[in-house]
Amino acid sequence: MARRTPGPAAIHGSSSISAELAASALERVHGPVFHGRKNVAALQSQLIAQPKFRQTFYGRKVVLARERPTAPSMFGTGSRFRLSTSTPEFAALLSAAVRFSSPITVKKIMTYLRYAPDIEKPAADEQETIDGIINGMTQQSETVETREHHAVRASHAKSSACGTGELTIAAGLPPELAQGLFAKPGTHPVAVRFAQGPGETLGDRVSTHRGMSIKVFDVPGEKLPGHAVDTQDFVLATGTTFPSGTAAGFLRDGTVIGKSTGLPEGVKSAVSSTMRNLNRALHAFGTESALADFFGHPYSHPLADSYFSQAPVRFGDYVAKLGVVPSTEGQRALSEWRLDPHQDEDGFRHATVAFFRENEVVFELKAQLWADAEKQPIEDASIDWPVAISPYRTVATLRLPRQDAYAPDRVRYFDEVMTFRPAHSLAAHRPLGSVMRARLQVYRALSDFRHRRNGVASEDTASIGLVPA
Ligand code: HEM
């Protein structure tokens, strides 16, 4: 019988390995996918439970087929596995991993793409598009102002909590993560505003995507033009992508959204509920729909959600998308919480403030470095950057202690006086791509509008001391 010769792209029967070693090898090759030993154990039991284990790791198919049970060997006792995979580079990594009887570290060789000014490609008519957005959003804000007798933010008007705390930048970050603000370990004061998505004060039956704005204080270094104080803002929202993709896309979609501003709340609630149902159905099939999320976020707890930049920023020598992920047990326990909006029209605020009253709130701040110019485009924010190409990696911890996160003076300051915007940035974290370039101009124009209309002087808050306790 002809023997199958292992080709360069596969490892066949000659490599007999124990379940633990197989799991450990996979975990070590793919580090960030399986977080730590717990997952080695989980993978191991999965391997033992199944005669054939197929998995896709970083886009590559791997098959582990269980062979006959064997006597104890230097590789361990119990089941032995035949391991095959399809690409030469990956086969080589696995081959190196399985040749050793004790766990070894096989580092995935990852090259990240560098920042250069020419990675941005503005459309020729971009300024017209941005002017169109400013006009459209200003009209929308005027409509809301007439109804509410007060000018509010053109987006994310209804705050659910206004917190203060600290951002701690981890020591010993690898060089590709120790960039910009994250180059130096240390702790900075922060102010954080949680808000619902719409640019008007609606009841929580309208549950759209929601936002989290972070202002980091005491940040020295060169800033973007027009930003004169030592702060860095990160203005984030739920969902990993911005569905309209570009400024032109937002103007197109925004026209439709803008037209709905004058509609009664019941109609918006019906739209929101249809989209939320669609979202739920899509989730059941494992498909994320950022567009559906934009119009109908689940009635989940704002402190159990993750928030993302959706569009990229410069990350010192590199480029990244950013995200924050809840990290305490208490927050994780909120993941099943759902608001009954018929009971409480301000339920998100009440739930968030109640949690802050009794608990510390912690988020890990993560950066997803840019690694593939084709699959991770700069200009189109509707395209999710695959985590299989580069995962989100922790660079800092955001810690908000127990507090009164809705004290009247503080809320007034956050909602009426303060501004968070992508333009409040270090040059080393310049927002990038079409959506971000639009935001650099639009937030200033619309913030000026609401401050002017309300007769309130806006402040580019320079220090945490200015934020009411
Ligand atoms: C073309 C795209 C976008 C436009 C035109 C836009 C416009 C605006 C405007 C005008 C405001 C109110 C600013 C103020 O009055 O101070 C705002 C607030 C906000 N936006 Fe956007 N936005 C865009 C994309 C995004 C994206 C991609 C995110 C998040 C990933 C986001 C998250 C937020 C948040 C969280 C706030 C509230 C900021 C605060 O707390 O002061 N927006 N947006």
Image (cartoon, rainbow, N blue to C red):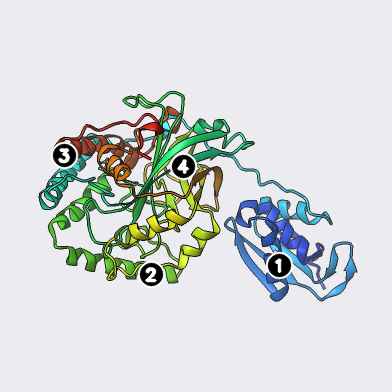
Quadrant of the image containing the N terminus: bottom right
The residue nearer to you, when weighing 371 against 27, is 27
Nearest to N terminus: mark 4 or mark 1: 1
Residue bearing mark 1: 64
Q: Residue at x 80, y 62 (%)?
A: 15
Dots 2, 4 in contact, CB < 8 A = no
For discs 4 and 1, the disc positioned in front in the rendered view: 4
Q: CA distance from mark 4 to mark 3?
A: 29 Å
Viewer can see residue 321: yes
Q: CA distance from mark 3 to mark 1?
A: 65 Å
257 sits left or right of 7 in the view: left
Residue 106: % across, % down: 72, 48
Tag 3: residue type? Asn
Disc tally is 4
Residue 306: % across, % down: 45, 54
Tag 2: residue type? Arg
Tag 4: residue type? Gly
Nearest to N terminus: mark 3 or mark 1: 1
Residue 267: % across, % down: 18, 66
For discs 3 and 1, the disc positioned in front in the rendered view: 3
Helix, strand or loop at mark 2: helix
Helix, strand or loop at mark 1: strand
Dots 3, 1 in contact, CB < 8 A = no
Residue bearing mark 3: 454
Nearest to N terminus: mark 1 or mark 2: 1
Residue bearing mark 2: 280
Q: Is mark 4 within 8 Å of ligand 1?
A: no
Badge 1, how many Cα within 10 Å: few under 14, some, many 20+?
A: many
Nearest to N terminus: mark 4 or mark 3: 4
Nearest to N terminus: mark 2 or mark 3: 2
Residue bearing mark 4: 165
